[in-house]
Image: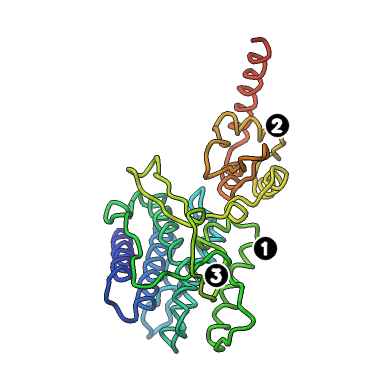
Amino acid sequence: MRKLVDNSLSAMLSAVEIYNKPQMTYRDEITVMMVVNAWELALKAALRQGNQSIFYPKTRGDRYRSITLDDALRRVASRKLWPAGIDGVAVTANVKALSEYRDRAIHLYNAKGLGAVIYPFLQQNVLNYRDFMLAKFKKDLADSMTWQLLPLGATAPADAVQFMRVDKNATMVAEVQDSIDELRSYMDSAEAAGSDMTRVATVYDINLRSVKNMTSADLVVAVSQTADGQIVVKKSDPNQTHPHSMKELIEKVNKRRVGRALSSYDHQAICWKKDLRNDAKFAWRHSNNDTYVWSGDAVILLASLTDAECDQMRLEYGSHLKDRAAS
């Protein structure tokens, strides 16, 4: 297992290094190949950690054959080996999207221009991978690389605010359209399952048309409180990152929960105890509106709480309200 983990980390670090080289032909294809390889090794390591086989039954006269990436993803899901706090369905959609791109590169080719389409998946994939490896093996990718790398180039990157919206007036080769349809299918499947869509791609809409300008409102620059001052720079649209009203949040949480259903009072107690309304990862409120909207991370957090934790927070919140009323 340890060798699988080490090789997986080496593959992901190689992918990041290759992608950030200033002179590199076949950049996207090689990067995606290495990223997919890193995930296949990581998933097999997770299976071995769970005392599961990573080989198909051996036939006499044949060599042992290790399971494919798709089978590894299925087995990790069926054996409930995804770490708590990581939406396995959404991460699977992300990995399979990159796997599809890899397969086209290996067996045929990828049409020019698909790099801009695949980049949001790649960006989110690295973040998903870091969370997965840290949770499963206590290995932090950040220990081996800097997170302050920025994509600098002679031309501006494609604006990726609207995902999979195709310019109907543009002439698109069949290869591009097929790839977009395939990526869209992974997105649709994950969304239909009620998954945390922020795990699938860093941004949700890619527009194949050129965009000349980008305003400062399109950027969010944040310094993480938990990763040694890690700088995170990304485009953010609250309609995408925080799509749920409180009612929708509770409905989605209760569909995922193993214990009792949560009520709006539970929600109030949890928000008070964990100060969720002041954490942009979970909540967002427009400056001219008192209503909060909630992210996919909020769904995962609330769904992961045990009944005992929720009951304790209800008790503490009730005491807080009584003390406030008395004062």
Q: Which residue is mark 2?
A: 265
Tell me what residue is drawn at x 58 percent, y 83 percent.
177
Q: Of the two numbered discs 1 and 2 on the same chain, state the one appearing first in sequence.
A: 1
Q: Which mark is residue 192?
A: 1
Callout 1: SS: helix
Which is more foreground, mark 2 or mark 3?
3
Total marks placed: 3
Quadrant housing residue 128:
bottom left
Q: Quadrant of the C terminus?
A: top right
Query: Which is more toward the observer, 186 or 155?
Result: 155
Quadrant housing residue 115:
bottom left
Q: Which mark is residue 277?
A: none
Q: Of the two numbered discs 1 and 3 on the same chain, state the one appearing first in sequence.
A: 1
Q: Which residue is mark 3?
A: 206
Badge 3: few (under 14), some or many (20 or more) residues near its Cα, within 10 Å? many
Q: Marks 2 and 3, how far apart in space?
A: 39 Å
Query: Which is more toward the observer, 54 or 96?
Result: 96
Q: Amino acid at mark 2?
A: Tyr
